[in-house]
Protein backbone atom coordinates (compact mmCIF):
# COMPACT_ATOMS: atom_id res chain seq x y z
CA UNK A 1 0.00 0.00 0.00
CA UNK A 2 1.13 3.57 -0.63
CA UNK A 3 2.49 5.03 2.55
CA UNK A 4 4.38 8.16 1.70
CA UNK A 5 2.33 11.24 1.01
CA UNK A 6 4.08 14.29 -0.31
CA UNK A 7 2.92 17.84 0.34
CA UNK A 8 2.51 20.16 -1.54
CA UNK A 9 1.51 18.30 -4.66
CA UNK A 10 2.75 20.92 -7.11
CA UNK A 11 5.25 23.74 -6.76
CA UNK A 12 6.32 26.42 -9.20
CA UNK A 13 9.33 28.56 -8.34
CA UNK A 14 11.85 30.87 -9.97
CA UNK A 15 15.34 29.70 -10.71
CA UNK A 16 17.61 30.39 -7.76
CA UNK A 17 14.86 30.00 -5.17
CA UNK A 18 14.67 27.13 -2.71
CA UNK A 19 12.06 24.38 -3.03
CA UNK A 20 10.75 22.49 -0.05
CA UNK A 21 8.61 19.36 -0.12
CA UNK A 22 7.20 17.36 2.74
CA UNK A 23 6.34 13.71 3.11
CA UNK A 24 4.38 11.93 5.80
CA UNK A 25 4.13 8.24 6.51
CA UNK A 26 2.11 6.03 8.77
CA UNK A 27 4.12 3.15 10.17
CA UNK A 28 7.55 2.62 11.69
CA UNK A 29 10.36 2.66 9.16
CA UNK A 30 13.99 1.67 8.82
CA UNK A 31 14.74 4.30 6.24
CA UNK A 32 13.16 6.91 3.98
CA UNK A 33 14.30 7.69 0.47
CA UNK A 34 13.69 10.46 -2.04
CA UNK A 35 13.61 9.88 -5.78
CA UNK A 36 13.37 12.21 -8.77
CA UNK A 37 11.56 11.51 -12.01
CA UNK A 38 12.13 13.63 -15.07
CA UNK A 39 9.39 13.65 -17.67
CA UNK A 40 9.35 10.40 -19.63
CA UNK A 41 12.07 8.79 -17.55
CA UNK A 42 12.41 6.30 -14.74
CA UNK A 43 12.85 7.25 -11.11
CA UNK A 44 16.34 8.12 -9.95
CA UNK A 45 17.43 7.73 -6.34
CA UNK A 46 18.53 10.98 -4.70
CA UNK A 47 19.14 10.34 -1.02
CA UNK A 48 18.43 7.87 1.77
CA UNK A 49 18.05 8.78 5.41
CA UNK A 50 17.95 6.14 8.13
CA UNK A 51 15.52 6.20 11.04
CA UNK A 52 18.30 7.08 13.50
CA UNK A 53 19.36 10.11 11.45
CA UNK A 54 17.73 13.53 11.67
CA UNK A 55 19.33 15.36 8.78
CA UNK A 56 21.37 14.53 5.72
CA UNK A 57 22.94 16.59 2.95
CA UNK A 58 23.92 15.76 -0.60
CA UNK A 59 25.06 18.64 -2.75
CA UNK A 60 22.14 21.09 -2.98
CA UNK A 61 19.78 18.62 -1.29
CA UNK A 62 18.94 18.63 2.38
CA UNK A 63 16.68 15.99 3.90
CA UNK A 64 15.28 15.97 7.39
CA UNK A 65 13.48 13.18 9.19
CA UNK A 66 11.25 13.48 12.23
CA UNK A 67 10.26 9.99 13.32
CA UNK A 68 8.09 11.32 16.15
CA UNK A 69 5.93 13.13 13.60
CA UNK A 70 6.45 10.49 10.94
CA UNK A 71 7.46 13.11 8.43
CA UNK A 72 10.35 14.13 6.21
CA UNK A 73 11.22 17.17 4.17
CA UNK A 74 13.35 17.61 1.06
CA UNK A 75 14.93 20.99 0.44
CA UNK A 76 16.51 21.86 -2.88
CA UNK A 77 18.60 24.99 -2.57
CA UNK A 78 19.40 27.43 -5.38
CA UNK A 79 17.09 25.62 -7.78
CA UNK A 80 17.90 25.27 -11.46
CA UNK A 81 15.69 24.69 -14.48
CA UNK A 82 17.12 21.16 -14.61
CA UNK A 83 15.53 20.47 -11.20
CA UNK A 84 12.11 20.52 -12.90
CA UNK A 85 10.78 17.04 -12.17
CA UNK A 86 8.51 15.01 -9.94
CA UNK A 87 9.88 14.08 -6.54
CA UNK A 88 8.77 10.99 -4.65
CA UNK A 89 9.39 9.85 -1.13
CA UNK A 90 9.49 6.14 -0.38
CA UNK A 91 9.63 4.16 2.83
CA UNK A 92 10.38 0.57 3.62
CA UNK A 93 7.25 0.27 5.79
CA UNK A 94 9.22 -1.65 8.42
CA UNK A 95 7.93 -4.98 7.15
CA UNK A 96 11.32 -6.68 7.17
CA UNK A 97 11.41 -7.05 3.42
CA UNK A 98 12.86 -5.17 0.50
CA UNK A 99 9.78 -3.47 -0.91
CA UNK A 100 9.25 0.28 -0.87
CA UNK A 101 6.01 2.21 -0.56
CA UNK A 102 6.07 5.29 -2.79
CA UNK A 103 4.10 8.48 -2.33
CA UNK A 104 2.07 10.10 -5.09
CA UNK A 105 4.83 12.47 -6.10
CA UNK A 106 5.40 16.19 -6.00
CA UNK A 107 5.65 18.13 -9.27
CA UNK A 108 8.25 20.91 -9.16
CA UNK A 109 8.59 23.42 -11.98
CA UNK A 110 11.59 25.74 -11.92
CA UNK A 111 11.09 28.76 -14.15
CA UNK A 112 14.30 30.06 -15.76
CA UNK B 1 27.08 -1.29 -15.67
CA UNK B 2 24.38 -0.29 -18.17
CA UNK B 3 21.70 -0.06 -15.51
CA UNK B 4 18.29 -1.71 -15.66
CA UNK B 5 17.33 -2.34 -19.26
CA UNK B 6 13.72 -2.55 -20.36
CA UNK B 7 12.29 -3.38 -23.74
CA UNK B 8 10.47 -2.28 -25.69
CA UNK B 9 10.41 1.42 -24.82
CA UNK B 10 7.06 1.87 -26.49
CA UNK B 11 4.37 -0.65 -27.34
CA UNK B 12 1.15 0.02 -29.15
CA UNK B 13 -1.25 -2.87 -29.46
CA UNK B 14 -4.89 -3.62 -29.99
CA UNK B 15 -7.27 -4.80 -27.33
CA UNK B 16 -7.14 -8.55 -26.91
CA UNK B 17 -3.54 -8.95 -28.00
CA UNK B 18 -0.83 -10.42 -25.84
CA UNK B 19 1.84 -8.03 -24.59
CA UNK B 20 5.22 -9.05 -23.19
CA UNK B 21 7.47 -6.58 -21.43
CA UNK B 22 11.08 -7.45 -20.72
CA UNK B 23 13.58 -6.46 -18.08
CA UNK B 24 17.26 -7.07 -17.47
CA UNK B 25 18.25 -6.09 -13.91
CA UNK B 26 21.62 -4.81 -12.82
CA UNK B 27 24.10 -7.65 -12.41
CA UNK B 28 24.37 -8.72 -8.79
CA UNK B 29 20.99 -7.34 -7.79
CA UNK B 30 18.87 -10.06 -6.23
CA UNK B 31 15.59 -8.17 -5.97
CA UNK B 32 13.47 -7.20 -8.97
CA UNK B 33 10.30 -5.11 -8.97
CA UNK B 34 7.61 -4.42 -11.56
CA UNK B 35 5.64 -1.18 -11.21
CA UNK B 36 2.84 0.45 -13.17
CA UNK B 37 2.46 4.23 -13.31
CA UNK B 38 -0.64 6.15 -14.36
CA UNK B 39 -1.83 9.67 -13.72
CA UNK B 40 -4.83 8.44 -11.81
CA UNK B 41 -3.22 5.81 -9.58
CA UNK B 42 0.39 6.94 -9.40
CA UNK B 43 3.14 4.34 -9.01
CA UNK B 44 1.84 0.89 -8.10
CA UNK B 45 3.93 -2.12 -7.20
CA UNK B 46 2.70 -5.10 -9.20
CA UNK B 47 5.07 -7.85 -8.09
CA UNK B 48 8.55 -8.34 -6.76
CA UNK B 49 11.07 -11.16 -6.80
CA UNK B 50 13.91 -12.13 -4.49
CA UNK B 51 16.47 -14.54 -5.94
CA UNK B 52 14.15 -15.21 -8.90
CA UNK B 53 11.26 -16.23 -6.61
CA UNK B 54 8.05 -14.17 -6.54
CA UNK B 55 7.63 -12.83 -3.03
CA UNK B 56 4.56 -10.65 -3.28
CA UNK B 57 2.21 -10.51 -6.26
CA UNK B 58 -0.69 -8.93 -4.44
CA UNK B 59 -0.44 -5.89 -6.67
CA UNK B 60 -1.08 -7.82 -9.87
CA UNK B 61 -4.45 -6.50 -11.04
CA UNK B 62 -5.97 -9.75 -12.23
CA UNK B 63 -5.27 -13.07 -13.86
CA UNK B 64 -4.54 -11.41 -17.18
CA UNK B 65 -1.21 -10.32 -15.71
CA UNK B 66 1.65 -12.74 -15.12
CA UNK B 67 5.34 -12.30 -14.38
CA UNK B 68 8.27 -14.64 -14.54
CA UNK B 69 11.92 -14.53 -13.66
CA UNK B 70 13.56 -17.61 -15.20
CA UNK B 71 17.06 -16.50 -14.16
CA UNK B 72 18.87 -13.73 -12.34
CA UNK B 73 19.32 -11.62 -15.45
CA UNK B 74 15.89 -11.64 -17.05
CA UNK B 75 12.25 -11.07 -16.18
CA UNK B 76 9.04 -10.71 -18.17
CA UNK B 77 5.66 -9.19 -17.46
CA UNK B 78 2.91 -10.52 -19.67
CA UNK B 79 -0.60 -9.22 -20.22
CA UNK B 80 -2.99 -11.57 -21.98
CA UNK B 81 -5.43 -10.42 -23.21
CA UNK B 82 -4.65 -6.74 -23.04
CA UNK B 83 -7.35 -4.11 -22.43
CA UNK B 84 -7.38 -0.31 -22.94
CA UNK B 85 -7.27 0.23 -19.17
CA UNK B 86 -3.87 -1.46 -19.10
CA UNK B 87 -2.41 1.57 -20.89
CA UNK B 88 0.30 2.92 -18.61
CA UNK B 89 4.05 3.17 -18.17
CA UNK B 90 5.52 -0.02 -16.76
CA UNK B 91 8.77 0.18 -14.84
CA UNK B 92 11.16 -2.48 -13.77
CA UNK B 93 13.55 -1.81 -10.90
CA UNK B 94 16.25 -3.83 -9.19
CA UNK B 95 18.09 -3.61 -5.91
CA UNK B 96 20.62 -5.39 -3.78
CA UNK B 97 19.11 -7.87 -1.32
CA UNK B 98 18.07 -6.53 2.04
CA UNK B 99 15.48 -6.46 4.75
CA UNK B 100 15.04 -2.72 5.03
CA UNK B 101 14.15 -1.28 1.66
CA UNK B 102 17.38 -0.99 -0.30
CA UNK B 103 17.89 1.66 -2.97
CA UNK B 104 16.06 0.74 -6.16
CA UNK B 105 17.40 1.39 -9.64
CA UNK B 106 14.74 1.94 -12.26
CA UNK B 107 14.72 1.22 -15.96
CA UNK B 108 13.52 3.81 -18.46
CA UNK B 109 10.09 2.17 -18.60
CA UNK B 110 7.83 0.77 -21.28
CA UNK B 111 4.99 3.03 -22.38
CA UNK B 112 2.08 0.75 -23.28
CA UNK B 113 -0.90 1.92 -25.27
CA UNK B 114 -3.75 -0.51 -25.78
CA UNK B 115 -6.20 0.68 -28.42
Image (cartoon, coloured by chain):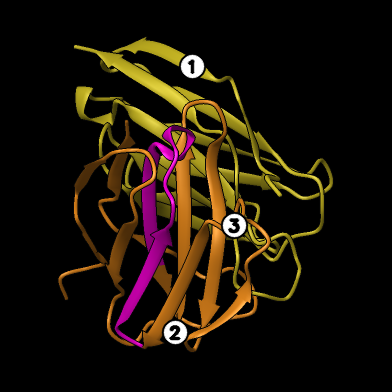
Chain colours: A yellow, B orange
Where disc 3 sits, the SS reads loop
Which image quadrant: the N terminus of chain B? Answer: bottom left
For mark 1, what is the residue?
Answer: A10
- Where's residue B83, x and y in %? 45, 39
Residue in view at x 38 percent, y 82 percent:
B29
Residue A28 at least partly seen: yes
Query: Magenta includes A74?
Result: no
Which image quadrant: the C terminus of chain B? Answer: top left
Where disc 2 sits, the SS reads loop
- Where's residue B28, x and y in %? 33, 87
Q: Are marks 3 and 1 in contact (CB under 8 Å)?
A: no
Residue in view at x 28 percent, y 18 percent:
A16
Side of B31 where A46 appears, left or right? left
Q: Which numbered disc flags the more N-terminal residue, 3 or 2?
A: 2
* Residue numbers of the magenta segment: B72-93
Query: Magenta includes B75?
Result: yes
Q: Which of the 4 image quadrants contains residue A29?
A: bottom right
Of badges 3 and 1, nearer the viewer stands 3
Note whether A111 is above or below A77 in the view shown. Answer: above
Looking at this view, name the residue that lies furthest to the left: B2
- Where's residue A84, x and y in %? 29, 25
Instruction: Report the chain holding disc 1.
Output: A
For mark 2, what is the residue?
Answer: B30
Q: Are marks 2 and 1 in contact (CB under 8 Å)?
A: no
Instruction: Report the chain holding disc 2.
Output: B
For mark 3, what is the residue?
Answer: B60
Instruction: Report the chain holding disc 3.
Output: B
Amino acid sequence: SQQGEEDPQALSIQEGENATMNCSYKTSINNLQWYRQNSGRGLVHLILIRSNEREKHSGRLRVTLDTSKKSSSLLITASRAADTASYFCATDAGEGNNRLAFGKGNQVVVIP
Amino acid sequence: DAGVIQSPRHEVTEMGQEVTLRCKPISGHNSLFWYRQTMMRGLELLIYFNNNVPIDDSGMPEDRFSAKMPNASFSTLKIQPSEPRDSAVYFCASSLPGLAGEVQYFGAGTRLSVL
